Amino acid sequence: MQINGFSKLSKEAKIDWLLQSYFNNDNAARKILLQYWHSDKALQELHDGFIENTVSNFYLPYAIAPNFLINGKIIAVPMAIEESSVVAAASKAAKFWLDKGGFKTEVTGTVKPGHIHFIYKGQTQDLIKFFRQNRDRILQAVDGLQTNMQKRSGGIRDINLIDKTAAMPDYYQIEFLFDTADAMGANFINSVLEEAADTLQELASEQLPDKLQILMSILSNYTPDCLVKASVSCPVTALKTEELSGEAYARKFVKAVKVAKIEPYRAVTHNKGIMNGIDAVVIATGNDFRAVEANAHAYAGKTGQYTSLSHAGIKDGIFHFWIEIPLAVGTIGGITAIHPLVRFSLQLLQNPSAKELMQIIASVGLAQNFAAVNSLITSGIQKGHMKMHLNNLLTFLKATPEERQKAIQYFADKKVSFKALKDLLGRD
Ligand code: MEV
């Protein structure tokens, strides 16, 4: 169904149109949308304003994974995610590492790049000379935009001309390197780049023999130099399970990680497990999970072969497990100051700097990965997963409180399956 001017309709009119066009005016559909409207009008308007064409709210469960010991400090981590077993797994892993020294983290860089992509059909030598002569003028032109960022110790760190003609004829970049302090910095970076591109265009038309065509100016969400490491370690003996000696467990764990290193089919799932934890914290703290995802996966493929973001080894009887991941996140700007739950999350995390948040997020990613690999090499993933999913299945079957109780007791020592549950509750 086509419509012009949808965005100009009121929220109610938008819903009326949806109902007429797609739901045969069925009021049950309206009820679904309306039941998620917040009764606090101001709060609802705040959420309506985040995006365009809002007709309702889409809830994600918001949960807490406590007991994360990170660099000697215990924190409770907020997580927003729909997948049943993620928070339970993160909490279990956090608890496991709590009495083993916890997570040690380090930010090894905070530089974020952005590029003016342009075409110049003239001589490369002319362009190099032009850039050398005009570099400072380009920087001066954007200096005013840096004032606030510089107050927070951020700003432009460098700019370089990059010759990309070997990959595409006549294609060059001006690469800017930024430190955006506690902001994720997308707006700052893009504003600087667009202003710089205007100046570049102006100076080029005055000084270069050939035409310079700006293609686009945009930050890169790939930030291999905005990087954080998180690690855990313990004597292998501390990893003993009912079935495996600590040594055997550690060897099996290291091999499982090795499989993710050498086999992309496994690496994608392995990293997806890491992102389960990472995205949940990224969302709860109001950050951009699409950017974080794109960045992480590009980093995982940086050598040309997609590989594991985490690493494991055994040295002198000590098991080491660590992650290295680029994370461009912020604790100011964006919706951090206006979304009440995001503000709550940041307060819960003791108002971290962006660097501290990077360390928390990396630790949760590592914990999540530890929990997943641990399940995979011991009980298998479905046992824990389906236990958590049982609740969703019971909801789907509209189970009564008594039926829920019965099912939970029944499956306490059995594998959960939809069929077994239906049999137990006598449903077809
Ligand atoms: C499920 O969401 C994530 C896992 O598949 C991750 C993994 O296999 O490592 C359990």
Image (spheres, helix red, strand yellow):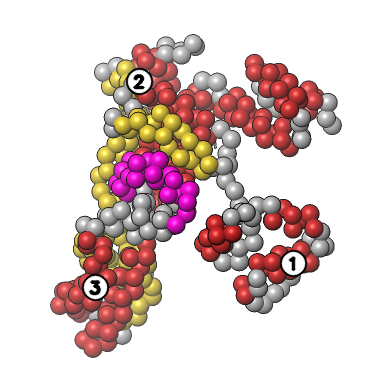
Check disc 1 and give the amino acid type: Asp
For image coordinates 67% across by 77% down, the residue present is 4
Q: Position of residue 248 (x, y in %)?
A: 41, 15
Task: State the residue position of label 3.
Answer: 144
The CA span between labels 1 and 3 is 48 Å
Answer whether labels 2 and 3 touch (C-beta < 8 Å). Answer: no
The numbered mark, 2 or 3, whose residue comes first in the sequence reads: 2
Task: State the residue position of label 1.
Answer: 16
For image coordinates 81% across by 59% down, the residue present is 26
Task: State the residue position of label 2.
Answer: 99
For image coordinates 43% across by 44% down, the residue present is 345
Q: Report the magenta residues as a range.
A: 338-359
Q: Taking 180 as reference, is 287 left or right?
A: right
Answer whether labels 2 and 1 touch (C-beta < 8 Å). Answer: no
Q: Taking 341 as reference, is 397 left or right?
A: right
- Local secondary structure at mark 2: loop
Name the mark nearer the viewer: 2 or 1. Answer: 1
The numbered mark, 2 or 1, whose residue comes first in the sequence reads: 1
Check disc 3 and give the amino acid type: Gly
Check disc 2 and give the amino acid type: Asp
The CA span between labels 2 and 3 is 50 Å
